[in-house]
Image: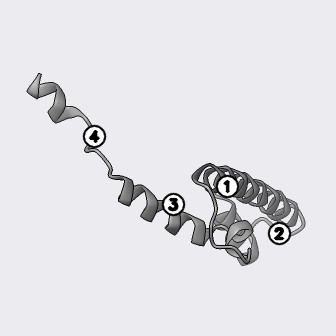
């Protein structure tokens, strides 16, 4: 049984979870901009998911815009190289 335990991830303490949630909360504009500093763990995780989804959508939108811009410039131009490097 000791070999099984050695393969398990180390246990995280309640204090570590609280610290991680606090750090995460500071990164979330929706929660960070509120007057109250308190948010439940589930709210922080929910807002994190929403924020990551919105960032993903923003990246997709910017990629689409760059692709449209790329179609308007000469494929061999320095500008095209820059745009292609941003898309990849």
Dot 4 or dot 1, earlier in sequence: 4
- The answer for how far apart the CA atoms under marks 3 and 1 are is 15 Å
Q: Residues within 10 Å of mark 3 (few under 14, many from 20)?
A: some
**Pointers 1 and 2 in contact (CB under 8 A)?**
no
User: In the image, residue 49 lies at what x, y percent?
Assistant: 66, 50
User: Whole-Å distance between the Cαs marked 2 and 4?
Assistant: 52 Å
Determine whether label 4 and label 1 are within 8 Å by CB: no
Label 4 sits on residue: 9
CA gap between label 3 and label 2 equals 48 Å
For mark 3, give the secondary structure: helix
Q: Which mark is residue 44?
A: none
* Place of residue 80 in the rendered image (x, y in percent of width and height, measured from the top left): 75, 69
Q: Please give the name of the residue rendered at 17% of the width and 25% of the height, measured from the top-left corner.
A: 4
- 24 displayed left or right of 79: left
Q: Which residue is mark 1?
A: 52
Name which residue lies at 63% across and 73% down.
Answer: 37
Which is closer to the viewer, label 3 or label 1? 3
């Amino acid at each position: 049984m000791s070999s099984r335990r050695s393969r398990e991830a180390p246990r995280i303490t309640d204090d570590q979870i609280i610290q991680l949630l606090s750090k995460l909360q500071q990164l979330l504009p929706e929660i960070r901009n509120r007057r109250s500093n308190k948010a439940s763990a589930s709210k922080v995780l929910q807002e994190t998911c929403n924020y990551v989804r919105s960032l993903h959508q923003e990246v997709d939108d910017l990629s689409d815009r760059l692709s449209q811009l790329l179609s308007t410039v000469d494929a061999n131009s320095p500008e095209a190289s820059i745009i292609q490097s941003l898309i990849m």
